[in-house]
Image (tube, grey):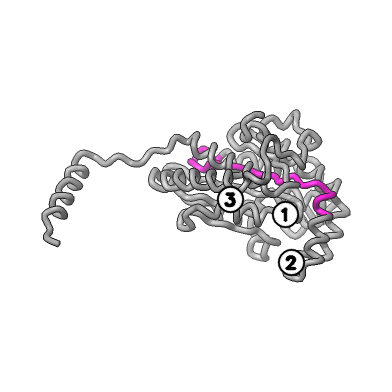
Amino acid sequence: MKNITELFKVTNGDKFSLDKYDTNFSGDYVKADADGILQDLVKQTAALQTALYAANSHSLLIIFQAMDAAGKDSAIAHTMSGLNPQGCQVYSFKQPSTEELDHDFLWRHYKALPERGRIGIHNRSHYENVLITKVHPENIVNEKLPGINSAKDINDAFWKQRYQSIRNFEKHLTANGTVVIKFFLHLSKKEQKERFLKRIADSEKNWKFSYGDIYERERWDDYMKAYEKAIAETATDECPWYVLPADKKWFTRIAISSIVLDTLTRLDLKYPELPEAERAKLDKAKAVLQAEKD
């Protein structure tokens, strides 16, 4: 089996199709080994997180997109649980506020970017502006854009420009030291149904289900087309998409952690080396401490 990173990586949008990705894939992995594998991956990633913070030359932005019930929240919790919370920040983007709608669609996402040395996780992201708005173009009207007075004013040229804005935004980020990883947790419609039924049956999970989820589920095909187009238009070598099978949560988490670890490893992060004068001060400090009487 190919390396997980290469197996699910999308960079050539011209040949991309969601139909080529099996939502139930787990390769040679078995569930019984999953916890041990994940713990090892998280441990290795935590060590590189320290190097990321010390080097202070890059930041890492991890984007999660998926249909409802694909497991974004639990994936974030399990794959990031071993990281230092001081160097990791999670943002969950909901419906934009009035203030956010008074700015361009990237504004609130730019504000949430991680500083150098830190890992930022965006649970949903700027891609909502070419996903949910593609299925529900009436939402674009709320942005009060010039020339857009109704959904009828939104044409192919509008979407072409929006994809370009996203590509330019991400290109700017990478040029300034932010490494971008984009995950689409690819869930089957059948598995979503099973997870919805479990939420309804479990009183402790009722809060996670809304009847509105049923209406969105009826637009499943439209959402798949929106995701396929968005991924095809914005998958680049610098900011690749990874389409991960999401029917088996345990494997999804292994895939996420493997790709994050591979990405950080490729940065070849180095701890800062002190100048000779500072090293001399360390030797002096060591001598002072050793000379102290207990």
Residue that label 3 marks: 79
Please name whichever residue, 267 or 286, is drawn nearer the observer in this view of the structure: 286
Residue that label 1 marks: 145
**Crowding at mark 1 (Cα within 10 Å: few <14, some 14-19, many 20+):** few
* Magenta run includes residue 216: no
Q: Position of residue 178 (x, y in %)?
A: 51, 43
Callout 2: helix, strand or loop?
loop
In the rendered structure, which segment of residues is drawn in magenta? Answer: 172-193
Three-letter amino acid code at the position of disc 3 = Thr
Q: Position of residue 120 (x, y in %)?
A: 54, 51
* Magenta run includes residue 190: yes
Identify whether 105 is placed above or below 44. below
Res 280 quadrant in image = top left
Three-letter amino acid code at the position of disc 1 = Leu
User: In the image as oriented, which residue stretches furthest toward the bottom?
Assistant: 203
User: In the image as oriented, which residue stretches furthest toward the right?
Assistant: 218
Please name whichever residue, 251 or 23, is drawn nearer the observer in this view of the structure: 251
Q: Position of residue 115 (x, y in %)?
A: 47, 51
Looking at the image, which residue is at 50% across and 34% down? 266
Residue that label 2 marks: 205
Looking at the image, which residue is at 72% across and 54% down? 145
